[in-house]
Amino acid sequence: MGLLLPNTRSASRVQPDAVVGGTVSRRDDLDGLRGVAIALVVAFHVWAGRVSGGVDVFLVLSGFFFTGAVVRGVERSGWVCAKETARRTVRRLMPSLVIVLAAVLLATVVLRPYTQLGEAASQTLASMFYSQNWYLANAELDYLSPDASVSPLQHLWSMSVQGQFYLAILALLAGWAWLRRRGHAGRFTLVIVLVGLGTLSFWYAASGHAQHQAWTYYDSIARGWELLAGAVLAVAAPWLRIPNRLRWLAAAVGVAMVLSCGPLFDGANQFPGVAALWPVAAACLVIASGFGGARAWPNRALAGRFCTELGTLAYPLYLWHWPILIFYLGETGRAHAGIVDGLVVIGASLTLAYATTRLIETPLRMPPRGQKAENHRGTGVLVLATAVVVVVASLGWQVVLRTIPTEPLQALDTRLYPGAAALVSGAEFWPEPMRPTIFEGPSDTPAATSDGCITPNREVRVCTYGDQAATRSIALVGGSHSEHWLPALEVLGVERGFRVVSYLKEGCPVVLADQPSYAEFPFPECHEWSVEVLDRLAAESPDWVLTLSTRYRMNGLGDEVPAEYLEVWSALQDRGLNVLALRDTPRLRRDGVLYRATDCLAHRGDPDSCGLDRNDALDAHNPAEEPAASYPNVHSLDLTDAVCRPQRCRVVEGNVLIYRDEHHLTASYARSLAPELGRQIGTITGWW
């Protein structure tokens, strides 16, 4: 989620919106469109937990305003005034951003566990230097990274897209200005170039949505066509005329499309693909409806005081509302805000937005004269000092984290750290400092993570562990929840004499559908990878294939066997392969929100309070047992009793940290599971 508000109302006084009959015409209705869009965005974030399409509307407006202003400047002077444009843009956008970043850092220090400071510092630097979208895109591809969806700075990805577009369009317009001075290019040529670039960007976005939506959502190139749509309108403005009798229809349809976008589309999983044509077309219709002649009544309604005043606060309101919401939900442990507390969040956001506009944004954008000039300089110095503190503090914490040892742990002394043995066999032990520690936990990963044997892409990577000279073999197949059993299988392979052959892909349990029922967006790459893996398994014919049999219910308690898993069992049966179907481990969730064990422990929690009730995490009986009985080649494994107590699934057992994040086992705890896993495998296979 998240959106970008390109300009405030007062900024449009500096950058008028349209050219009509060769003169600049101010567009109050577009200020009002900002107000309507920000109202929808905030409401959908607070009460619906989804995007409203506002990001796309604002990106169109951003491309329209910025490109139009630069093009008019070129036509006046013959040059792109890059220095003045950059100065004006930085003065408009940076002060409010700096204040919000400082507030978020301070709130993180005061309210959140210290384990989140490193992530907050990284995202602060990414936001400050307009690369937050790429930071989040890479986080989506890295299953080891923290869940970015709970970050109070996640929404700033769209500002990064905007800033990158500004640099790119300035470079393009500088080239156009050079050609124009030599008589080789006019507005029409520029329109053709912008349309061509926009078409390529749209094709890229549509293709990316079908292949990897998680990355495409943040991709600047995929978002470029939305900004270029506004840019085309700005350049083509002198030629765009809508007949009076159709102007009101265009405006009314555009406004209706803006209002209906949120209910009709799941923007987080569909934009900026083909579905984003809806909000982009809506914004374009409203913009185009104001070219030439008297304004239609929808434009006049948008230009009313309520909408335009809200548009004035749009940018700072955008900056403030998301972190306030995230910190509120984090402190209360709720997944969503209700009506009353949602209104409180919005009220606090509006108050801070107004204060930021009045005390920071307006004085620095419109420097006063006389005595007030001293106050202006003081405000500027304060913002600059705050920016320095934010950058230095963020960099400093990164340096501190680099000094903390995070090398993968070697095998722990089982007498001091029995781990799962404390549950399975009642092994006695004295309390010892938890291992891995809070800072060691996230890096206590299986070998496949460090040696690259779990693939992030379409490539099928095959690696061998355990007793590599053995004739017997178990193929470990699936995603990261299969991978986190590798340390236990490595131990067993060496002790019991079998090879562990891995076929692993991040975020991809073996499936034969482009979009499984439990997936939030299409992932055809996973399907393609799975088909090739099944064919390789048929050719290699391992003795057993170990893969997952269950998955947590996304919208409820307990666990289940997705229909797609049964389809894979059938495919394995058709290939004559025997299957060890392993029940998945519980995920740490409260009210549907995932949380990290290390965060909870660092934030006044203990192994019990940071855990969850077993009945909330898992069904009373293994849901895979009944369907597995219908497949003669499928045999169930269930190590729940080696991870959870009868009533509670804790995050530490036998002095060993169980989870390295929200749902992956630490390698140390997985190794402690080897005896029980070996007992169950031996019973099924008869190998020992």
Image: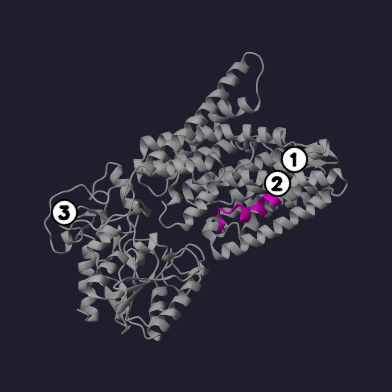
Q: Is residue 18 visible?
A: yes
Instruction: Tell me the residue at 68%/54% (across/down).
Output: 281
Say whether disc 1 or disc 2 marks the residue closer to the N-terminus: 1
> How busy is the neighbourhood of tag 2: few (under 14 within 10 Å), some, or many (20 plus)?
some
The kind of secondary structure element at disc 1 is helix
Which residue type carries mark 2?
Answer: Ile
The residue indicated by pointer 1 is 70
The residue indicated by pointer 3 is 416
Asked if the stretch drawn in magenta spans residue 217, the answer is: yes
> Residue 642, percent across and down?
21, 63
Q: CA distance from mark 1 to mark 3?
A: 68 Å
> Residue 222, percent across and down?
62, 56
- 660 to the left or right of 84: left
Which residue type carries mark 3?
Answer: Leu
| Range of magenta residues | 216-228
| Quadrant hosting residue 265 | bottom right
Instruction: Tell me the residue at 70%/56% (across/down).
Output: 198
- 194 to the left or right of 185: left
Q: Is residue 9 visible?
A: no
Asked if the stretch drawn in magenta spans residue 385, the answer is: no
Contact check, label 1 and label 2, Cβ < 8 Å: yes
Instruction: Tell me the residue at 79%/55% (across/down).
Output: 192
Which residue type carries mark 1?
Answer: Val
The residue indicated by pointer 2 is 169
The numbered disc on residue 20 is none
Q: Nearer the viewer, residue 58 or 172?
A: 172
| Quadrant hosting residue 160 | top right
| Quadrant hosting residue 24 | top right
